Amino acid sequence: MPAIKEPHFFAQDLGSYPRIKTLEDYLSLFAECTEDHLRAGEASVYYLRSTTAIANIHRFNPDARIIAMFRNPVDMVYALHSQLLYVGEEVISDFEKAWRLQERRSQGFDLPPGSRGSFLLHYEQFGHFGTQAQRLLSTFPATQVKLILYDDFAADAQKVYDEVITFLGIPHDGRSSFPRINESKGARVGWLRRFSRKPPPVLRTAVRRLKEAVGEGGISAVKNKLVELNTIRQPRAPLDPELRAELVQTFRDEVLLLSRVLNRDLSHWQ
């Protein structure tokens, strides 16, 4: 896996969001691969959300193996809002208000300063799991696709991990411990978190010069420490029952489609 875990190179319909823009830069991520590496991969989370990434991946490597995990879309969009709020891509802390603004934001209105794309705030599109899974399986053969339900992973992480190892055709590393490493979190001071993620343009030149003077490692260590001190782990409040019911209805057809694609009963998501 490359140091840049989520290059999003193949999601070329997501505007300026992809961190890696050229094929040359993408291939350079894997420059250290040798014949001893049985598999090489990356983990761009928005490849399913993109309408072009899967086809682009297939053109790049028709033998690629794809792993995707799905969870209840209602829970997913609520969690996504928290994550975007934490990283500074969202500035409206009230999820229902952010959900109601989707249409305006898709037209370019009410976007946060420095937004990398209105697509990030169109929460409903992220939850179209049935359509996404269908698009994936219409491009790659089922033997090259591993679709996982988060419910299964949460219930028995070892079993799912073992299945992925088998799917990739690599030796098992003996791992048997799977601690939670990305629990719900927030910022103690919102403006400080946004500042650390998206400093004002006037300061970016100064930061670049400082990096050149003291080195990337020193600046990153300070920044990471500030982020750590400003981060709090906190469970999300339960969704308002009326809003949850609305979201369940919104995603009903997509859940039914995913149920058919996976041949799994997902009625507990309804």
Image (cartoon, rainbow, N blue to C red):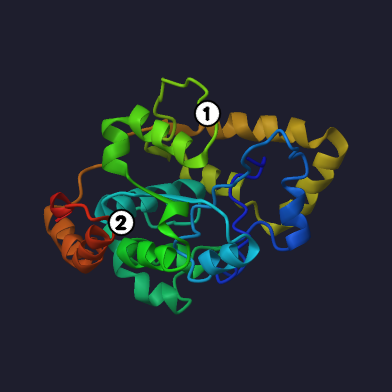
Residue 68 position in % (x across, y down):
42, 50
Would residue 244 appear left or right of 96 to someone viewing this image? Answer: left
Q: Which part of the image, by quadrant, shows the N terminus? A: top right
Query: Height in image: 176 above or below 154?
Result: above
Where residue 11 sits in the image (x, y, percent)?
57, 65
Residue type pointed to by label 1: Leu
Q: Nearer the viewer, residue 98 or 181?
A: 181
Q: Residue 50, how many percent across, how many down?
A: 49, 66
Q: Is residue 209 left or right of residue 270?
A: right
- Quadrant in the picture for residue 53: bottom right
Q: Amino acid at mark 2?
A: Phe
| Sequence-wise first label, 2 or 1 | 2
Quadrant of the rendered image containing residue 178: top left
Please tell me which residue lies in front, 179 or 82: 179
Q: Is residue 36 visible?
A: yes
Mark 2–mark 1 contact, CB under 8 Å? Answer: no
Residue farthest bottom in this picture: 107
Compared with residue 215, is residue 87 higher up or lower down, i.e. above or below? below
Say if residue 235 shows up in the picture: no
Q: Neighbour class for label 2 at 10 Å: few (<14), some, many (≥20)?
A: some
Residue identifier under label 2: 95
- On residue 6, which mark appears? none
The residue labelled by disc 1 is: 229
